[in-house]
Amino acid sequence: MFDKKDLDNEALYARARAEAELIFNNPNTRKGRSLEKIIETVEYGHTAEWFLIEKVGYTDNPAMYQDVIDLDNDWVEVKVTKISQYIPSVLQRLNEHRRNLDLWGKPAANKAMIFINDPYENTYYKLGGYYEWDGFKFSEKTCLHLLKSMV
């Protein structure tokens, strides 16, 4: 578990705003949302990514709309959901998206992490699960990189 308050929130906001502006400037991804709403949504997910970058040593993935690169140089997809009961639906969407990327011949993350946070309740993020692609679906595993960082 980590607390958003312990992160460099100015850098986090700048990173989230940069991606939010890309989303906002494209009518297909904007979907009628205001820039402020997109920033809020992007920052919610980026908080977990920023924790991995700032506190665990992961690096930002320079590929468009990709998340982070772990200590083994593998791409990692990072998701955040409000409650643990939503994890199965998040996994279902991750699996479908990953299969589509394979069909289209696009590069994709072989690892995924799902964090849990209710932003209306608190600033704490908890790891809900760590997963690795098995060729058909993301299967739950243990992330050795986080054993020390999440204690």
Image (spheres, helix red, strand yellow):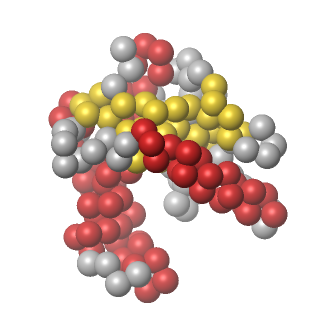
Q: Nearer the viewer, residue 3 or 64?
A: 3
Residue 37, image x and y in percent?
26, 69
Residue at (36% x, 31% y) in the render: 126
Residue 123, image x and y in percent?
21, 38
Q: Nearer the viewer, residue 63 or 108?
A: 108
| Relative to 3, 150 lies left or right | right
Count of residue discs: 0
**Which residue of the protein is positioned furthest toward the front in this rendering?**
85
| Relative to 73, 145 lies left or right | left
Instruction: Work out whether residue 65 can be spotted.
Output: yes
Residue at (19% x, 39% y) in the render: 122
Residue 119, image x and y in percent?
23, 47
Instruction: Work out whether residue 69 can be spotted.
Output: no
28 over 121 or under it: above or below: below
Residue 128, image x and y in percent?
46, 33
Q: Quadrant of the N terminus?
A: top left
